[in-house]
């Protein structure tokens, strides 16, 4: 018990230290001059004017899909919601980054202000405030309940790059990281694992992610976590530091993310921790299952603990009551009402709203091909299914992590399912790996794989 208490106190100390480091980093970037940031950001106004608020890759096709029309012929053929970008939040991020008010730097770092007008859509307010002959500083708005840790990266980038330039940089860096991850994956597991991962990426739809800063944060964190895990697995395993790893992932996610698809930074590394284990079957025993559940609690501890730190620091060091605001927003995001019309959202409706992104002719064909593969593997290896289920059922359980998230945060998951669906990559990868483990014709690189 003393070891448990000691570890818990260590985790708490790490979270408190992260509050301090996060606060210092934010304060430091708010000391940078905003002139060049503003100039580079304003040069990108035309992008928002041209693309609008939620542009898709195929703008000539505009089918808005939701649970009530998912079986209509037009939706089945042409739904392209999965390709949507979130310029709404990207414009908001730019406005936060270039704010140049006269408040004290601590106040600006903790309350995160922006200039806006009467329009609540940041794309339109960004255009109205910054696209004319003179910058319109009509009213000040605040968004204090998030850390906005992305500003630690975005503000320095805006000293040299426009929004369009940041998009190009994202495509280059993310492509390089993904290629390197696949190389590491090839060395550890072979080509088949790259294939399974590539198929799971189809359900993530990575093509629009680099073009949207809001989607990039969790994507970068996840890619970095997987690369570090592949490179340093033996060291992490020898020190039994997986708990610390998941704690840090929860902390970093809460610091940088805008509540997009944060659970991805837990689910994907968890799958590979199990696959890299010399005794992966251990995780389908009661002791192993408890270990996985504890790691989930540790990730949640880091995520919630880091997020709460922003509310506490902002409430203590400024005149804002961010704790009250944040708790009210949590109650809203977990309740059963959503949308302008305050539709009652059940857990099933929230889940369906995310699944609806895959309702179009292309994904129907892709899913049909995958199901045929699953059926083929099941028939050829039906004698292995029982032992595979006995030794790997934990993968099936992990596949339900996004479902639990959608059911819990039903309001947010329903309203923002055009990007929260990306958490389902966890489900796709976990279940694909389970099916692959039914096979006995391919030699695996690790015991139990």
Image (tube, rainbow, N blue to C red):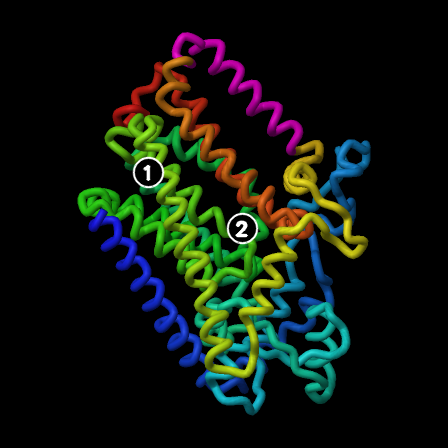
Instruction: Classify 10 Å Cα crowding around label 1: few (below 14), some (14-19), many (20 and above).
Output: some
Q: How many marks?
A: 2
* Residue at which label 2 appears: 261
- Quadrant, the C terminus: top left
Image position of 198 (left or right of 92): left
- Is residue 324 magenta-colored? no
Q: Is residue 366 magenta?
A: yes
Question: How far from the left and from the top, in percent, is residue 44?
Answer: 63, 72
| Residue interval drawn in magenta | 363-385
Say what secondary structure mark 1 lies in: helix
Q: Quadrant of residue 351?
A: top right
Q: Disc 1 versus disc 2: distance between alpha carbons?
A: 23 Å
Residue shown at 50% from the left, 60% from the top = 257
Furthest toward the front, the residue is 1
* Relative depth, front residue between 291 and 186: 291
Q: Is residue 160 visible?
A: no
């Amino acid at each position: 018990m003393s070891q448990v208490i000691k570890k818990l106190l260590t985790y708490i100390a790490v979270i408190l230290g992260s509050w301090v480091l996060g606060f210092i980093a934010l304060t430091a970037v708010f000391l940078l001059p905003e002139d060049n940031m503003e100039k580079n950001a304003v040069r990108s106004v035309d992008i928002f004017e041209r693309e609008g608020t939620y542009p898709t890759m195929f703008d000539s096709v505009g089918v808005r899909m939701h649970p009530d029309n998912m079986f209509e012929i037009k939706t089945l053929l042409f739904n392209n919601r999965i390709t949507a970008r979130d310029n709404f939040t990207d414009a908001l991020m730019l406005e936060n980054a270039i704010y140049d008010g006269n408040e004290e730097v601590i106040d600006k770092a903790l309350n995160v202000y922006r200039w806006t007008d009467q329009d609540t859509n940041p794309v339109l307010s960004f255009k109205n405030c910054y696209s004319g002959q003179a910058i319109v500083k009509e009213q000040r708005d605040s968004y204090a309940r998030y850390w906005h840790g992305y500003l630690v990266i975005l503000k320095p980038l805006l000293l040299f790059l426009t929004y369009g330039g940041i998009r190009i940089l994202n495509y280059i860096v993310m492509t390089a990281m993904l290629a390197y991850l696949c190389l590491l994956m090839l060395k550890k597991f072979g080509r088949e694992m790259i294939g399974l991962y590539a198929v799971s990426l189809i359900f993530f739809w990575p093509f629009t992610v680099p073009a949207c800063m809001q989607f990039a944060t969790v994507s970068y964190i996840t890619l970095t976590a997987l690369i570090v895990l592949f490179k340093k697995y033996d060291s992490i395993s020898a020190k039994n530091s997986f708990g610390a790893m998941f704690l840090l992932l929860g902390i970093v996610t809460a610091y940088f993310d805008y509540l997009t698809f944060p659970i991805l930074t837990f689910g994907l590394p968890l799958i590979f921790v199990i696959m890299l284990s010399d005794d992966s079957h251990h995780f389908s025993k009661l002791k192993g299952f408890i270990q996985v559940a504890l790691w989930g609690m540790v990730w949640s501890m880091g995520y919630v603990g880091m997020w709460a730190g922003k509310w506490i620091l902002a409430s203590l060091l400024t005149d804002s009551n961010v704790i009250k605001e944040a708790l009210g927003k949590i109650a809203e995001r977990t309740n059963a009402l959503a949308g302008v019309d305050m539709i009652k959202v059940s857990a099933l409706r929230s889940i369906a709203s995310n699944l609806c992104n895959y309702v179009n002719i292309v994904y129907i064909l892709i899913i049909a091909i995958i199901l045929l593969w699953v059926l083929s593997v099941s028939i050829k290896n039906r004698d292995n299914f029982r032992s595979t289920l006995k030794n790997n059922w934990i993968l099936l359980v992990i596949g339900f992590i996004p479902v639990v998230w959608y059911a819990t945060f039903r309001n947010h998951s329903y309203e923002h399912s055009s990007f929260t669906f990306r958490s389902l990559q966890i489900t796709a990868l976990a279940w694909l790996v389970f099916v692959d483990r039914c096979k006995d014709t391919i030699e695996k690189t690790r015991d139990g794989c």
